[in-house]
Amino acid sequence: MTSKNTVELLGHYGSDETHALSAWTSTSRNLTHEKRNRIPDLLKKLAKEGHHSVFEKSSLHFLLVTDISTHIHLIKHRIGVSVNAESARYKELNDDKYYVPTDWPAEEREMYIEHIEGCFKKYHDVLNRLIESGFSRSRAKESARFYLPYGNQIKSDVMFNFRSFMHFLKLRYSVNSQLEIRELAGEMIRLVSETGQFDSTLKAFGFVTPEGSLCKPFS
């Protein structure tokens, strides 16, 4: 089953106001109309000057389906990030989902699909043969997965605090990053922006333009 990498925003906590209130803890957290109007400039100043601890007070929770190589990019982010992923060690992967590069010529895509579907067949076949030959089901599952290639997709549950999300985007929403993780990061920004809760924060870090449009990947 061919599939694109996908992102779902499961939930979020916090907002621009949460970040501002954290910054105002040492003065007064009482919000007036005048102080609310100051939030965009305050967050821009904090982002520019490196006072980023206030952005740790919000969190973003995603459900991702990605190829293995993109998943590896994700798990390199460990500070302020929590990742739990589907594992072929504990279950037989029966849906045979895999990613196909979107920018490949049609002929290359066809050869790749033939190859990866063959890998999945070998995976299921060897799992059954190992069990029939006396292996425990757990050992058969964890070792049969060696047949699965990088294009195999897995599901992962990922949560960032907002500061860590900004760091992730700085590295992965970049023209220098791999296409697949860059596209994933762009979709994550879009979903977070659509909540309407983090407009000023996203603008402060340059991920959304002053007009509200998603910025282009960083160079």
Image: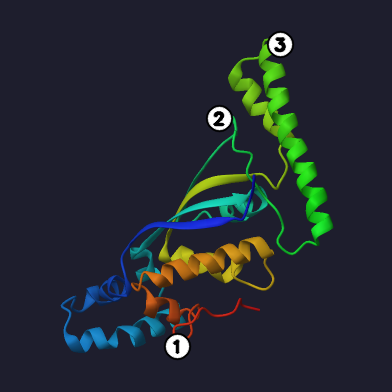
Q: Residue at x 60, y 68 (%)?
A: 171
Question: Looking at the rendering, which quadrant does residue 101 occupy?
Answer: bottom right
Q: Circle 1 sits on which residue?
A: 211
Structure colour scheme: rainbow
- The residue closer to the viewer here, 110 or 69, is 110
Q: Position of residue 150 (x, y in %)?
A: 71, 46
Please, what secondary structure does the residue beneath circle 3 have? Answer: loop
Q: Amino acid at mark 1?
A: Glu
Disc 1, disc 3: CB below 8 Å?
A: no
Vertical arrangement, residue 168 with respect to residue 205, above or below: above
Q: Circle 2 sits on which residue?
A: 91
Vertical arrangement, residue 41 with respect to residue 192, above or below: below
Q: Quadrant of the C terminus?
A: bottom right
Q: Residue at x 40, y 84 (%)?
A: 44
Q: Is residue 20 left or right of residue 205?
A: left
Q: Earlier in the sequence, mark 3 or mark 2?
A: 2
Q: Earlier in the sequence, mark 2 or mark 1?
A: 2
